[in-house]
Amino acid sequence: MSQHTPPRILLPIAILVAILSVSTASIFIRFAQGDGAPSLVIAALRLTFATLILAPIALSKHRDELKRFTRTEILSGFFSGIFLALHFATWISSLEYTSVASSVVFVSTGPLWVALLSPMLLKENLARTAIIGLGLSLAGGAIIGLSDACVWDSGLSCPALQDVLQGRSMLGNLLALAGAWTVTGYLIIGRKLRTTISLIPYIFMVYGFAAVVLIVIMFASGSSPFGFAPKTYGWIFLLAALPQLVGHSTYNWALKYLPAALVAVTTLGEPIGSAILAFFILNETPGMATLVGGVFILTGIYLASRNR
């Protein structure tokens, strides 16, 4: 694979395109969920459509490289696909229980976990500010979690801790956080694989493995991908085409040239873009506590990753 470095201006432009593209994901997901599509069906079809779109290009123009994949590369790609499948299964499900703003803020903590794990898994030094960043992010998460359960009525009034932990919003926030943890594994493995594998063969392999895993999970849960209105499939196709193939694939392209933590921190633009779109399209207005908690989390992520 060529080690050619792209023009300096191309990387920031590509990252901006990726941010704008992935910001639309939660909107398309909400529309598909509103039409009655289960979250696991949306996740499975998203990766299936993306893989099918890539197939003609991968099999015609990159057949030789696909044949040269080593057993280690295939096994690593399989585990990367599992992480990606679990990421979408948990994050898309989170949007059934919590707001777009809360969900996207929590799932965007991925850079923090990449920064904390990179020294151990990628031998990339951990910045001292990572600990401060972790503290700020945890504080922000607590603020958002409590804001979904507490009310201000002549003073702060919160339900019992057990009720908070069992609430719908808390479940959604935890699912989004699980999405952040799983995308961390996907990014770290991708950082290693992208040093030896070209973009199209890499994403074709990983998206394909993720699609298979999600299809198995979908049928095991009793869900079916059939019987929905054409409009519903249209939303999922747009989800595959724009956030997945343009957004995620651009991030995967950047992994060849940038550290995993730096690529991950560029996703900080997604909560902002998604919240703006949700405000105008879904009429979702984030509360003040969600905004404050979001600032804590995003600042923490930035501090944890800024030296990368």
Image (cartoon, rainbow, N blue to C red):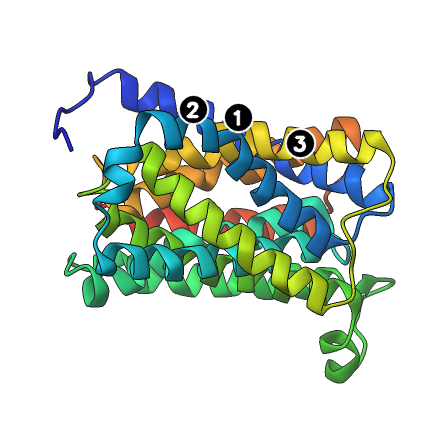
Comparing 201 with 290, the one in front is 201
Residue 1 location (% of width, % of height): 15, 33
Q: Is there any visible trace of residue 128 in the rendered image? A: no
Amino acid on which the number 2 mark rests in the picture:
Leu
Closest to the camera, between mark 3 and mark 2, is 3
| Label 3 packing within 10 angstroms: few (<14), some (14-19), many (20+) | many
Q: Which numbered disc, 3 or 2, marks the residue that appears first in the sequence?
A: 2
Which quadrant does the C terminus fall into?
top left
Amino acid on which the number 3 mark rests in the picture:
Phe
In this figure, what is the number of numbered marks? Answer: 3
| Disc 3 target residue | 237
- Residue at the (53%, 26%) spot, across then down: 20
> Which disc, if any, is residue 224?
none
Amino acid on which the number 1 mark rests in the picture:
Leu
- Residue at the (70%, 69%) spot, across then down: 220
Q: Secondary structure at mark 3?
A: helix
Does residue 28 sit above or below 292 in this rendering? above
| Disc 1 target residue | 20
From the viewer's perspective, tell me whether residue 299 is left or right of residue 263. right
- Residue at the (20%, 16%) spot, across then down: 7
User: Based on the displayed image, in which of its 4 quarters is residue 5 positioned?
Assistant: top left
Separation of disc 2 and disc 1 at Cα? 6 Å
Marks 3 and 2: CB-CB under 8 Å? no
